[in-house]
Amino acid sequence: MNSLKQNFFYSTLYQMLSIILPLITSPYISRVLGPEKVGIYSYTYSIANYFVLIAMLGFKNYGIRSIAKVRDNKEKLSKEFWSILELQLITSSIMFAIYVFYLVVLRPKYLLIAVLQGIYVFSAMSDISWFFFGLEKFKITTIRNTVIRLLGVVAIFTFVKDGNDLPIYVFILSFNILLSQLVLWPFLKREVHFVKTSFEDIIVHLKPCAILFLPVVAVSLYNIMDKIMLGSMSTMEESGFYENTEKIVNIPFGIITALGSVMLPRMTNFVAHNQYKESKKYIELSMNFVMFLSGAMAFGIAGIAKVFSPVFFGSEFTKCGILIQAITPIIIFKAWANVIRTQLLIPNERDREYILSLFAGAIINVIINAILIRPLGALGAVLGTVAAEGTVCIYQTVVVRKDLNFKKYFRDTVFYLISGGVMFLAVNYLGERMGNSILTLVLQISLGAVIYLSLCIVYILVDKNNCIHRFLLKRKIEGGKTK
């Protein structure tokens, strides 16, 4: 079994590449295409993404959980893999056929762009990343992802030259996703052998997959529906502002999602072997770690947002500064809820509570979007997303309150939030005094890092009840014994 450190490193790299590499191209694309073309891409991608979500049903989380349970038995592993994959091929084929019907019969607006997004829809058939995550083999997916995505970045800078090249941009991104799925297949023969499956072997996965598909639908209502509602109820420019706002606020989720991806199979394995004490130890450490990170990133991003947006995206996207500041609370909410979801609810198959929490958030989000998007545009969608993520976080905390010692978590979190608030005030003030420039950004980031880390390091070293303090002390003692 690979170490958690190694898995976390590769999983973090995998998630961060998915966010940072598109971010590298964003200043260029924002200036070359402009807000309207960026909005058209966001709108058509969001529609295609719905087809992919339905095609993938609940295979991501269900596949990881199922593979983690049987990974020590190659015969069971092979049967589990092929039966899940065959069900995925069925659902993906159906959804691709429906997407073709959508293109041919309904002939949507921006038809050419929608056709090119169809490559992304088709790629769902070949996505087997869940299998390697279930085996905790993050290195394979990370290396593959790095090479393919770097080639995509090079292609964007090479072939996308002006606003007329939007179709080329969409083709590069869609084909890049398909290629990144296909290159995993050669590694399969080392892990499984072909097993002939029956209809019963396949259909048995339908119900649990469908159950885990419900949270995917709920999440999509406030991660994807925002963009579709913006495109329908407001302007493509507003969609473009929202697209770039999301790109920035999604950066912290790379690390948070990486931790969840690593811990889900490990926690599932703990539960399968009744190792509940180990499970709670990792939850406490994970919660402290992600709240330390999310406090820094939420307040840090909010502090630099007004300077960052025009410097990074160009003056046409100045409005993104206010939008980014408004949306940063979701970093705190999602970090907290991610630990509860991936390390307690899903490993223990408490799917009902997980699903209800997400639907509660989805309902809140759609209602607020419907009320605020017309008068406020992208800001309305931002406020809806914040309310949705806050609802999910609070709901999940309430349903697991008897299982975890939240008193400890709240105490540490409050300090991290206070430290973040102090950092925000200093960084934001510096930005207002110095104006918009790269130098201002560098100084803001440097000042923010010094303030936040100084406050948190003092707290962690002084507070003996802090789990990071205890973890570091234990490592020091173990290191002394080794010597």
Image (cartoon, rainbow, N blue to C red):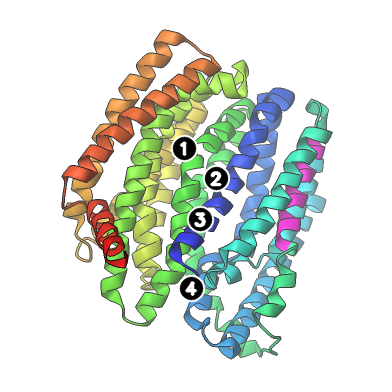
Q: Nearer the viewer, mark 2 or mark 3?
A: 3
Q: Can see residue 215?
A: no
Query: Dots 1 and 4: beta carbons under 8 Å?
Result: no
Q: CA distance from mark 1 to mark 4?
A: 34 Å
Q: Nearer the viewer, mark 1 or mark 4?
A: 4
Residue, disc 3: 9
Q: Nearer the viewer, residue 287 or 81?
A: 287
Residue, disc 4: 65
Query: Dots 4 and 2: beta carbons under 8 Å?
Result: no
The residue type indicated by label 3 comes to: Phe
Is residue 20 in the magenta section? no
The residue type indicated by label 4 comes to: Arg
Residue, disc 2: 225
Q: CA distance from mark 1 to mark 2?
A: 9 Å
Q: CA distance from mark 4 to mark 3?
A: 21 Å
Q: Nearer the viewer, mark 4 or mark 3?
A: 3
The residue type indicated by label 1 comes to: Asn
Mark closer to the chain start, 3 or 1 = 3
Q: CA distance from mark 2 to mark 3?
A: 32 Å
Judge left or right: residue 7 versus residue 303: right
Mark closer to the chain start, 1 or 4 = 4
Judge left or right: residue 306 versus residue 153: left
Residue 307: where, in percent of width, then height?
A: 49, 19
Q: CA distance from mark 4 to mark 2?
A: 27 Å
Residue 401: where, in percent of width, then height?
A: 21, 60
Residue, disc 1: 369
Q: Is residue 71 above or below residue 14?
A: below
